[in-house]
Amino acid sequence: MAPERIYITGMGAVTPYGASVGRLWQGLLAGESGISDLDRFDLGGIACVKGGQIRDYTPPPHPLPQLDLATGFALGACTEALAQAGGGAAETGLVTASNFGALDEGERALAGEAPDTALAACAQVLPTRRLGAALGLEGPAVTLSLSCAASAAALAHAAALLRAGRAKRLLVAGYDALSRCAWSGLCSLRTMTRDRVRPFDLERSGTLFSEGACALVLERADVCAARGGEPLAELSGWATGNNGFHLTAPPPRAAGSAQVMRGAIACAGLTPDDIDHINAHGTATRPNDLTEAQAIHDIFGPRAEALPVTANKGALGHMLGAAGGIEAIASVLSLRHGLIPPTANFATPDPEARVALVAGQPREAALRHVLSNSAGFGGCNAALLFTKV
């Protein structure tokens, strides 16, 4: 018997562009920069002063006595995704993914500015509970934190739960907020540029981090059909892994990413020849771009010179726990519109990181299968394969 197909039926986004999937898509197609000078908190002399800060955002109405900034972003994305998907909350479970959880609230206790009880906000499980309560979800709840691959891995985990019959319908939310504590830690990694994010460009000098949230509703095909739902795309393949090579550096030729990309293709019952487009992790750090390009060549061989690749972080920055899910949404939109957003800030090809990068203008393409790759510190890797319905 063929395994049950997994559909995406709703999507939501809160990004530096604004609070909607439509605004996300508009910004990516235009190559619009989501980066600005940070002014929410005192930088205290930190050299990194630019990021993807969200301004003028108000979360949807909710019954909670308090709501931290990060969970507010997630609530907005989840509300949009559930509204698009339709269906009831009673049968919907929740899988969340984040790097920092509600650290924007918890750091006040760490700084002695709030009672010690606020330290609970440093645990990712608290936003999961708050989201479930605010949305009235009654299904199972799972909390994941897998570095910058978090929301892609959460989508893979949700798909596996659905296929195993552990749930019928799951809401996956990836989110993070910028705060003093988080920002000082990110700056200490020495991966940030003082210029622009230039994925795969010869002049790339690092990444920049952003805040926000993504949300996707996943359902088994039989559940979607029974309620008359409309699928946006099929999540046809997925894979996760941890290569354990190094805390921050990628292994040679991005072996961990190559493993999960191959795994997602195999999970879908496809071959590399079936893939029409890749949404790359594309952090614009020299080691990651170089090894990711090598992995693409190792998997796709001669096709790697022509297979269209985009990297959304050039325009939007690196959205931390939301990054993989935002790129999943972009992949689904590419399938639905037959349009690949350009990689912003690309000017000079790197002969050592050769990929067929879409740059300058959006590219029209007849897409059937799109592969999205995500990677994170500690060797966390995840890949997702989306198929047009």
Image: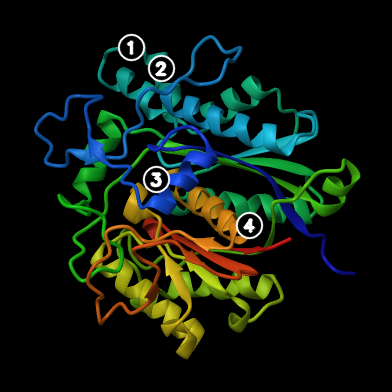
Q: Which residue is mark 4?
A: 336
Q: CB under 8 Å between callouts 2 and 1?
A: yes
Which residue is drawn at the image coordinates 76% and 47% (left, top)?
219
Q: Kindly identify the amino acid type of the residue bearing the numbered disc 1.
A: Ala
Could you say which is closer to the camera, residue 134 or residue 110? 134
- Sequence-first tag of 1 and 4: 1
Which mark is nearer the camera, 1 or 3?
Answer: 3
Q: Which residue is mark 1?
A: 114
Question: Mark 1 packing: few (<14 Cα in 10 Å), some, or many (20+)?
Answer: some
Q: Is residue 278 left or right of residue 163?
A: left
| SS at badge 3 | loop
Give the distance between the C-alpha atoms of the residues marked 1 and 4, in whole angstroms.
47 Å
Q: Which residue is mark 2?
A: 118
Q: Which residue is mark 3?
A: 319
Which mark is nearer the camera, 2 or 4?
Answer: 4
Q: CB under 8 Å between callouts 1 and 4?
A: no
Question: Mark 4 packing: few (<14 Cα in 10 Å), some, or many (20+)?
Answer: some
Give the distance between the C-alpha atoms of the residues marked 1 and 3, in whole angstroms.
27 Å
Question: Mark 3 packing: few (<14 Cα in 10 Å), some, or many (20+)?
Answer: many
- Sequence-first tag of 2 and 4: 2
